[in-house]
Image (spheres, grey):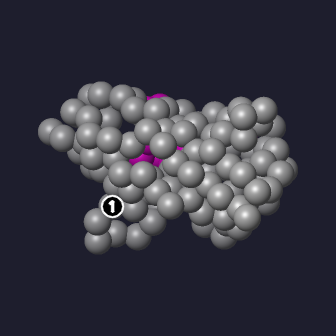
Amino acid sequence: QVQLVEFGGGLVQAGGSLRLSCVASGYTFSNYAMGWFRQAPGKERDFVAVIDWSGTNTYYADSVKGRFTISRDNAKNTVYLELNSLKPEDTAVYYCAAGDTTVVVTTGMVDYWGQGTQVTVSS
């Protein structure tokens, strides 16, 4: 059974930092690109960042470029998202996802989704 479980969400002040983790099980983690998405209340789920299977290539949404960093550890079946210089508009539920390629993940046509973790940034 495939599972993606996110950790690390919480409440932080503007300008602060958080580190999200997503632990995968039930499939061959290193065969998939991994991504992070977010959904704010009343809005659609948006792409945040993606990393290829090897960890070599990463891509970010313009809104988070330079502030967020995605990484992965294939030995631990884990993908991370480092969130820095947080803004109130970063408040959302953050989801990790797995897909065949970075392009596929970016479009949201993923194979697996996590259940999400809440990030709240206070002003």
The residue located at (63%, 34%) in the rendering is 71
Measuring from the top left, give residue 120's x and y in whole percent: 27, 46
Q: Residue furthest front?
A: 1
* Disc 1 element: loop
Chief SS of the magenta region:
loop
The answer to which of 23 and 119 lies nearer the viewer is: 23
40 inside magenta stretch: no
Q: Residue at x 48, y 43 (%)?
A: 7
Q: Nearer the viewer, residue 77 or 13?
A: 77
Residue 85 position, x and y percent, is 34, 30
Quarter of the image for residue 64 reads: top left
Q: Quadrant of residue 123?
A: top left
Kindly tell me whether residue 94 is visible in this rendering. yes
Does 63 appear in magenta?
Answer: yes
The number of numbered badges drawn on the structure is 1
> Viewed as shown, does residue 29 lie left or right of 115?
right
Residue 41 sits in quarter: bottom left
Residue depicted at 56% across the width and 59% down the height: 114
Residue 27 picture location, percent across and down: 80, 56
5 left or right of 33? left
Q: Magenta residues, as a range?
A: 57-67
Q: Residues within 10 Å of mark 1 (few under 14, many from 20)?
A: some
The image shows residue 20 at horizontal and vertical percentages of 48, 39
- Reading the image, the residue beneath label 1 is 40
Q: Is residue 119 above or below residue 27?
A: above
Q: Identify the residue shown where x is 41% and y is 46%.
A: 63
* Amino acid carrying mark 1 in the image: Ala
Judge from the rendering whether residue 97 lies leftward or rightward of residue 46; answer left or right: right
Quarter of the figure with the N terminus: bottom right
**Residue 90 seen:** no
Vertical order, 87 against 111 (above or below): above
